[in-house]
Image (cartoon, rainbow, N blue to C red):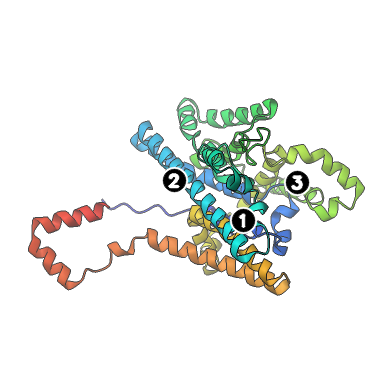
Amino acid sequence: MRTTKKQRDPRLDFFRGVAMLIIFIAHVPTNLWAIYIPARFGWSDAAEMFVFCSGYAAAIAFGGTFLRTGFTHGILRVFYRIWQIYSSHILIFFLILALCVFGNEVVGVKDYVGRLNLRYFMNETPEALLGLVTLTYVPNYFDILPMYLGALILIPVAMLLARIHPWLPIAASAALYASNWILDGGMPAHPKYPHLEWFFNPLGWQLLFFTGFALSRGWIKPPPVKAGLIILAAAFVLISIPFAHWPTWSRIPAYKEIHDVLVPYRNKTDYGLLRYIHFMCLAYLAIAFVKGREHLLLAGWAKPILKVGQQALPVFLLNIWLAQAAGMVMDLTGRNIGIYAIVNLSGIACVIGFAYLCGWIKSAPWQSAPAPAATLRKTAGDGDLGRARSTSYAAE
């Protein structure tokens, strides 16, 4: 019996792609375009999109393995992914460090090593290197992948709890989130300064990750699309704008007072509850808008964004490297409206092109390419040995 391949959810790929493009713009130093990204008008930002979608995708990628082939295989697959993310974290650290050293030595406009607070690594390399590989040295610019590792490692626990009751994983996630706030938990980010913590505390952010995971697995159901809920969600998002938009709340004393009161509840490190509610309202509005219009996300205009979303990890790694390179370019050329447009649009084009390249490589086009005639004749003459070699290469 021929099985049909399950179609990807375009909503997941589209919104991951949007998040990746926003992350590039947000990470370019002193980028005029960054003042117009959604994060400047609300309490949540592209990081929420990345984490929520990662949780949703992780449930698709790993959840089925636990059910189809058993708990051991599921754990092995999760830890293989953890190794991929961990090694990516180490790799991108050295690639960006090398870029910063290049900027200092060749570009010479600014202290790029100092700008990313990497002087500690350069001055005390043995201690910093040990901290890097043990994740006890996590500079701010490199903090989202370690947080993702912290969420991934909890997946086997969630799958085990789901065997007892589907609601238990999200209840445990909420309890862990609350415990982190009550006990003021955190992960050490600097060997010399114990008070410094990971900028993204996984004990807080895992709540969003496992909300996406639970929705994807069907452990919890999304609220129905109703006019009353749409109005409520939209009202919350609109009301938050004056207290999130710096040019607004900083100039109106009454708004500033309210903003200052709300600061702990929109805290990014421990993941304040207002950020969670704000993002879930936005997600609900997005799903309500797309419902019945999913075909729009498959149109030609959306294909580059979908492709970026399908290659989220390699694109993210390119994003944070390319953003620093783009900043160096603007340090050399100066900053004006034209330069901002050229650099940002060129960077976005590079990100999209890289996503297509990754997709093409992952499709393994060489497997379907016809072999040269001489090779076919030689393989046919080799008999069983030729067939054995073909099987071996196919297995690779």
| Residue ID for mark 1 | 23
Q: Secondary structure at mark 2?
A: helix
Q: Secondary structure at mark 3?
A: helix
| Residue ID for mark 2 | 84
> Reading the chain from its start, which is encountered first: label 2 or label 3?
2
Q: Residue at x 62, y 27 (%)?
A: 175
What amino acid type should be assigned to the residue bearing mark 1? Ile
> Reading the chain from its start, which is encountered first: label 2 or label 1?
1
What amino acid type should be assigned to the residue bearing mark 2? Gln
Near-viewer residue (73 or 281): 73
| Residue ID for mark 3 | 236
What amino acid type should be assigned to the residue bearing mark 3? Phe
Depth check, mark 2 against mark 3: the one in front is: 2
Near-viewer residue (17 or 79): 79
Near-viewer residue (313 or 191): 191
Cα–Cα span, label 2 and label 1 = 21 Å
Q: Is residue 254 left or right of residue 273?
A: right
